[in-house]
Image: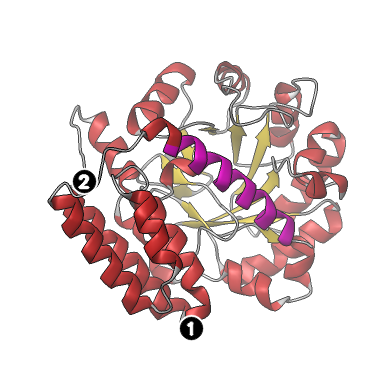
């Protein structure tokens, strides 16, 4: 896939997610075939002011390339200046978030709020392109605000002002995640614009990704929640394109989970990051029997070595069918409700 002058090997991308897509998460996603990853969403004002946390969130290594950075902002001049600053980091893509539906973000006239003001959105994109030194600009949007769909209008304005790619989450701002995404609008945008279109919305497995590409003719898919504890999805997508089905073994899941813990320890250090390690481990094993017991054990862990020990013991118990069968649908409901609540809170922190 071609994004501006950038050639991307795989058209399955990892979505930017606040407090999730850190170095460890991105590294493993890339290892399993993600064609493009994104750092966590950062505030345009934070970039200009050299805010410590902002700079920490957007830092990446050369071996992670190609990689994108996502900005949250509302004023064309400020977002443009932030892009000029980001050029120094040499990302491969700079994205504008016009999809975040969180109330606090919306009330501050950012994220999905921009969908209600297409002309202002166009001005922001134009400033981004002007200050990007040729780095491709992407814009992530939803179908529209609370009560209407205006994705075609916004997509055309985004293209006309020089963006290189459009990412479409196929829900309106008011739609909850239990509402099915309307993929047909991705297809309508693809018919209207000449720049690449990336589809997003309820891609939880390889079949979802292939179906989205077949039904909408989008150029790539962006995977968010489907990648939590499941970096294997990127390899599964590529294998399914060839007609193959790839399923990681429990030993492979264990190896990758422990690798994730080690990356967090090595890159971020300090036991204050234990909570993030625990969350990721729970995600890796969320559909395996005994997950509630695993959660209980992890809760009391006080260091990284104890987390690794808990994983090994859990694997041994799984091998001997120690745990009763879980209700996958119930676990999935609890998982999604908790993750969505947590993501909303983390997105509020980006500028708060």
Disc 1, SS: loop
Q: Quadrant location of residue 145?
A: top right
Indicate yes or no whether the magenta region holds residue 161: no
**First along the sequence among labels 2 and 1:** 2
Disc 2 and disc 1: Cα gap in Å? 30 Å
- The residue that appears at 85% across and 57% down in the rendered structure is 77
Which numbered marker is on residue 248? 2
The segment highlighted magenta reads 331-350
Colouring of the image: secondary structure
Residue placed most toward the observer, 268 or 189: 268
Residue 29 x, y percent position in the rendering: 37, 54
Specify the quadrant of the image occupied by residue 88. Answer: bottom right
Q: Local crowd at mark 1 within 10 Å, few (<14), some, or many (≥20)?
A: few
In which quadrant will I find the C terminus?
bottom right
Q: Where does residue 91 sit, x and y in percent of width and height?
A: 54, 62
* Residue at mark 1: 270
In the depicted structure, whether residue 5 falls above or below residue 20: above
């Amino acid at each position: 896939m071609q994004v501006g002058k950038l050639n991307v090997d795989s058209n399955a991308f990892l979505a930017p997610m606040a407090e999730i897509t850190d170095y460890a998460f991105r590294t493993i996603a890339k290892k399993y075939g993600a064609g493009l990853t994104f750092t966590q969403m950062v505030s345009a004002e934070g970039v200009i002011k050299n805010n410590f946390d902002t700079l920490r969130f957007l830092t990446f290594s050369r071996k992670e390339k190609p990689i994108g950075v996502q900005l949250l902002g509302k004023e064309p001049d400020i977002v443009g200046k932030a892009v000029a600053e980001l050029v120094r980091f040499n990302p491969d893509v700079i994205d504008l978030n016009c999809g975040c539906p969180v109330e606090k973000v919306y009330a501050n006239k950012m994220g999905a709020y921009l969908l209600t003001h297409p002309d202002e959105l166009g001005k922001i994109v134009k400033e981004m392109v002007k200050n990007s030194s040729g780095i491709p600009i992407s814009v992530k949007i939803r179908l529209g605000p609370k009560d209407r769909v205006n994705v075609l209008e916004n997509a055309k304005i985004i293209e006309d002002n020089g963006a290189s790619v459009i990412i479409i989450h196929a829900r309106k701002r008011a739609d909850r995640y239990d509402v099915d995404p309307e993929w047909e609008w991705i297809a309508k945008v693809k018919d209207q614009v000449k720049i690449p279109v990336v589809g997003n919305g309820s891609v939880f497995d390889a079949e979802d990704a292939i179906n989205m590409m077949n039904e909408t003719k989008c150029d790539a898919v962006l995977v968010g929640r489907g990648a939590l504890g499941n970096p294997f999805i990127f390899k599964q997508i590529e294998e399914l394109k060839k007609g193959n089905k790839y399923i990681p073994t429990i030993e492979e899941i264990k190896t990758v989970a422990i690798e994730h813990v080690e990356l967090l320890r090595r890159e971020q250090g300090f036991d204050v990051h234990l909570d993030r390690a625990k969350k990721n481990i729970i995600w890796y094993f969320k559909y395996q029997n005994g997950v509630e017991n695993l959660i209980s054990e992890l809760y009391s862990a006080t260091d990284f070595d104890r987390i690794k020990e808990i994983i090994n013991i859990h694997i041994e118990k799984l091998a001997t069918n120690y745990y009763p069968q879980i209700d996958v649908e119930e676990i999935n409901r609890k998982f999604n409700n908790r993750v969505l609540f947590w993501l909303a809170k983390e997105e509020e922190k980006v500028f708060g």
